[in-house]
Amino acid sequence: MATLSRTAPGGDSLSRLAPILFAILQILTPVLPQLGIGDPIGDQSDSVRTLITPAGWAFSIWSVLYAGSLAFAIYQALPAQRHNPLLREIRWPAAGAFLGNAVWAAYTQIYGLSVISTAIILFTLACLLAIYRRFAAWKRPLRPGERWCAVLALSALGGWLTAASIVNIAASLQFHGVEAGDGAALISAALVVVGGAIVCAALLRGRGNPAYGVVFLWALAAIFAAGGQRAGEVAGAVVVAAVLVIAGMALGLRRGGTAHWFG
């Protein structure tokens, strides 16, 4: 499929502008409650807290993710990067991910963590996984700017959104009154292990992308610090998931990932 820059006048400029606009929008949207619109995301999350909702300190990572998003948005728009083939392929998926974050924040603050919020976050994750695959499949050596401003920033965002999608699914079930009763701990533990297995497989196929794996481990640590202290099943599941993620990352790096990501 031809890129927009090849099919429409001004398409190249639009593809470079969209990530900047949406990167800024995703930062501004969470302040809506300060304007009297909706409730803070933290309050909405606390209202449907589950055993796999991460500890509050984990969400401080958003300051780093926002900074990385802006760094990527600015870097890809530089005149010197206008015809960069890697950036050309990921500009629109990145813009879609940033827009997805903004829409998710707006919807969640107004309506809560419903099934619609899950659909939004899964769309966002799909955009980031498309980028993740392009990074892993890229054949020429990555340039320093690409590593720091594109790979690191967007892979880290993908790792967090992978964990957030699992948490959002559990919160949505709670939102809609689907209760697990006495089986809540086991079901929560199963979700964590399945999530760890999925990430392990992604790391094996993705050359052990370290930014993606480390950020997912950050989320696991926060789940252990919260739900893991309330249910032994969840604590054990976090340990199993962490071992899977570390193994996937190590094996992926051994299969050529170290040279690919670090040069």
Image (spheres, rainbow, N blue to C red):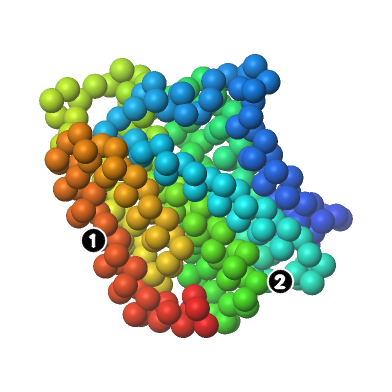
Nearest the viewer among 76 and 58 is 58
Amino acid of disc 2: Asn
Q: Residues within 10 Å of mark 1 (few under 14, many from 20)?
A: some
Amino acid of disc 1: Val
| Disc marking residue 100 | none
Which quarter of the figure is the N terminus placed in?
bottom right
Identify the residue at horizontal 79%, vertical 72% (top origin): 80
Classify mark 1: helix, strand or loop.
Answer: helix
Where is residue 70 drawn, in percent x and y?
Answer: 67, 53
Among the two numbered marks 1 and 2 on one chain, the one whose residue lies closer to the N terminus = 2
Quadrant of residue 58 in the image? top left
Q: Do the CB atoms of the residues marked 1 and 2 lie less than 8 Å apart?
A: no
Identify the residue at horizontal 21%, vertical 53% (top origin): 239
Alpha carbon separation for disc pair 1 and 2? 37 Å
Kindly identify which residue carries mark 1.
243
Quadrant of residue 98 in the image? top right
**Vertical order, 100 against 44 (above or below):** below
Horizontally, is 118 left or right of 190 in the view?
right
Nearest the viewer among 63 and 240 is 63
Horizontally, is 113 left or right of 134 in the view?
left
* Whether residue 126 is visible: no
Where is residue 111 drawn, in percent x and y?
Answer: 51, 20
* Whether residue 169 is visible: yes
Where is residue 224 drawn, in percent x and y?
Answer: 27, 44
Kindly identify which residue carries mark 2.
84
Residue that lies at the very extreme toward the right in this rendered image: 9
Nearest the viewer among 205 and 257 is 257
